[in-house]
Amino acid sequence: MTVLPDDGLSLASEFPDATREQWQSLVAGVLRKSGRDLPGPAAEEALSTTLQDGLSTRPLYTADDAPGGIGYPGFAPFTRGGRPEGAAVSGWDVRQRHTLPDPLRANEAVLSDLENGVTSLWLSVGSAGIPVSGLATVLDGVYLDLAPIALDAGAEFGPAARALLKLYEERGVARHAARGTLGADPVGELARTGREVTGLTEEAAELAALCDREYPGLRAITVDALPYHEGGASDAQELGCALATGVGWLRDLTAAGLTVEAACEQIEFRYAATADQFLTIAKLRAARRLWARVTEVCGAGAGTGAQRQHAVTSPVMMTRRDPWVNMLRTTVASLAAGVGGADAVTVLPFDHALGLPDAFASRIARNTSTILLEESHLGRVIDPAGGSWYVERLTDDLAHAAWAWFQEIERAGGQRAALHDGLIAERLAATWQERSGRLARRREPITGVSEFPQLSGPPVERDPAPAPPGGGLPVVRRDEAYETLRARSDAHLAATGARPRVFLAALGPAAAHTARATFAASLFQAGGIEPVHDPVTVDAATAADAFTRSGAAIACICSSDALYAEGAAPVAAALKTAGALQVFLAGRPGEQRETYVRAGVDEFVVAGGDAIAVLTSVLDRMGVA
């Protein structure tokens, strides 16, 4: 190695170090120009973003914000990864999900996946997917000593596990070569169905003991946090529920005779990966840190505290309208899962919310990981986010919030007790209600649904998927409130041949009305209401005629504040005279509010307003069933 001489040259030597106070002063100066006179620290706080769980992201992070003791990859507390080499040897496990109930069709899909880059299979077995009796057919032609199998069979995990183990024996697979997880998850079944089947925990413990004795590459237990994510949980709540479930399994498995180390080796954790990439990265890193602390307290050896993680792109974020945008969401989510250190990553097909995926959607799903690994070489960097002051602080904050929720669950008697007495459901409902408010106000925009929706074009249709189990925690989706409105619009279109319409009365030149007309059009389209407007400039004299010709039942006036003061009132009056059921004005009315209301304006639509309430009232007024 050649050592270059130190010539004393430093590119920044002539520039003094900037302080945080200087930066805050500059920020305060910029805010002062916009009418907000705030001192330095308050100016920085004004640029912070509030997240769920009492967390926030600040506009500036320095080395002083990073917590200490994050360790090294592959060593406790495993924040930076469960393995020293990270994913650098072979990348993460590309694990694709299969739910086709027809074993022959499922076998075709399985073989196609394995031939084209998938490295393990996640099989939904039982009433919600592949019949247990069809497992041999589904895996016909699969090299079971090369392709790990992850089962997801709900309450039928026992028969499914025995069928898979029998298949290993029949096909001559050495017991040490069998890899994957048997998917025993009675707690997750309780969360999904609200029912606790007697004997499932004991059966799961027996499978764990069998795997510990005879199948070193198999894990028996899955701690699935998806029921909580799909029930509306925040990231900290998802982590806390998973941690409490994992602790419960340590108690059950050690009571059944396993050592703490053996019990740890029998558990795999499953988390949701969302399009909020930094929160997903922080969540997976925090999860490993939290589990390492649990195993440490339980007396496990230092080498057994690495949590095995399976990340799945979030079903909650998947939309039914304009589903092609889901490709972007799942790409960001899978990238975040890989960067966060997940051992296995499942990318759900973009048409997941519509039913069974077609061949194109399945190909895109598996290719997402392939491109990230083989073309972007994402797996060749160990802990890519490590050292980012923002990510390290977010990881630490999220870990503390999750630990507090975990402790509350433990005080309530553990995860099962908290599910039975309604604590989990109550907290998740409150969290989802708060998030639903942000979605309704478009503070959390949904591209293709609440922002830039498309009303034209045929809907994307798929064969229905097997009905998932229900009766426990609810299953929520980000798009559900808007989907209800769009369904009403679709029914109106089918019954009348046209969608409900809104006339956009655009006053003045394009420079004056384009911004608010675009805002109003997007707002009404989110509810399935088609915007129409006259291409010529509208004033009071032409408003009534243009409205009548549009075939719309309601109208929205769009322009600048200056032109509103000059002509909004007479236009509103003309629209009312022409028969408009409701007249809206895009923008805040200011001191002219009473004038506009007296002239006929019924409501003002603004950024941050409750879009769901406005659109629901409009459809109700127009008689859209």
Image (cartoon, rainbow, N blue to C red):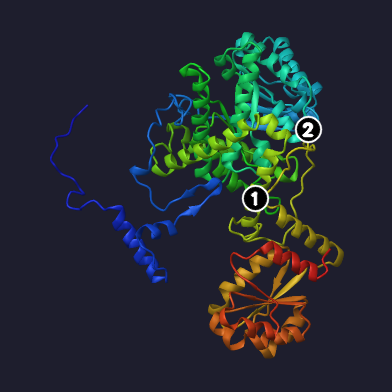
Mark 1 burial class by Cα count in 10 Å: few <14, some 14-19, many 20+: some
Residue 485, quarter of picture: bottom right
Residue behind mark 2: 128
At x 48%, y 16%, the residue is: 301
Give percent across and percent down for residue 284: 52, 35
Amino acid type, residue under disc 2 in the picture? Ala
- The vertical placement of 564 against 307, above or below, is below
Relative placement, left or right, of 324 versus 45 is right
Give percent across and percent down for residue 129: 77, 31
SS category of the residue bearing label 2: loop
Q: Which label belongs to residue 337?
A: none
Residue behind mark 1: 324
Give percent across and percent down for residue 186: 72, 26
**How many circles with numbers are drawn on the protein?**
2
Residue 500, quarter of picture: bottom right
Which numbered disc, 2 or 1, marks the residue closer to the eye? 2
Distance between the Cα atoms at labels 2 and 1? 25 Å
Residue 424 appears in the picture as rendered: yes
Mark 2 burial class by Cα count in 10 Å: few <14, some 14-19, many 20+: some
Q: Please report whichever mark, 2 or 1, sits nearer to the chain's N-terminal start.
A: 2
* Between 454 and 150, the one nearer to me in the picture: 150
Amino acid type, residue under disc 1 in the picture? Trp
What residue occupies the far bottom of the structure in this picture? 541
SS category of the residue bearing label 1: helix
Residue 453, quarter of picture: bottom right
At x 66%, y 38%, the residue is: 228
Give percent across and percent down for residue 547: 73, 81
- The vertical placement of 559 against 342, above or below, is below
Relative placement, left or right, of 80 versus 608 is left
* Between 573 and 454, the one nearer to me in the picture: 573
